[in-house]
Image (tube, rainbow, N blue to C red):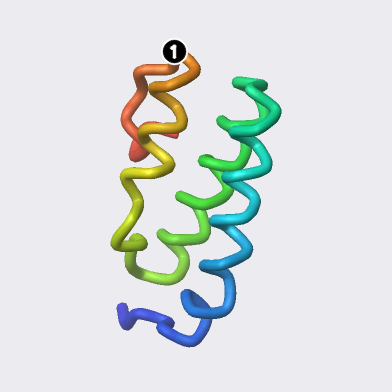
Amino acid sequence: MSIDYARMNRVGPKQKAALTRAIKTKDPEKIVAVCKAAVQEWNEIGAWRDDWHRWQIALSDVGIYTDLRDL
């Protein structure tokens, strides 16, 4: 499986913006939904972002102590 770098570059900023918006709502359900969507897309692309830990921290900050891979 090869990595789709063009797709990662295209969706990366959108994912980061979606995470920022979800964090600002402080709604755990929205944060989980954004994280799930990001993980699914990363898996389809064939690689995770270098800053994947931001999504993990967002989950932890709202009291959800689940590994991103388990979403």
The outermost residue toward the bottom is 6
Q: The residue tagged with tag 1: helix, strand or loop?
A: loop
Q: Position of residue 26 (x, y in %)?
A: 63, 22
**Residue 57 shown left or right of residue 37 in the figure:** left
Q: Residue at x 58, y 48 (%)?
A: 37
Q: Which residue is mark 1?
A: 63
Q: Amino acid at mark 1?
A: Gly
Residue situated in front as seen by the camera: 52 or 20:
20
**Residue 12 shown left or right of residue 17 in the figure:** left
Q: Work out whether 64 lies above or below 68.
A: above
Q: Residue at x 59, y 33 (%)?
A: 23
The outermost residue toward the front is 24
**Residue 13 shown left or right of residue 2 in the figure:** right
Q: Quadrant of the N terminus?
A: bottom left
Q: Position of residue 51 (x, y in %)?
A: 33, 56
Q: Residue at x 36, y 62 (%)?
A: 49
Q: Position of residue 8 (x, y in %)?
A: 47, 75
Q: Quadrant of residue 71?
A: top left
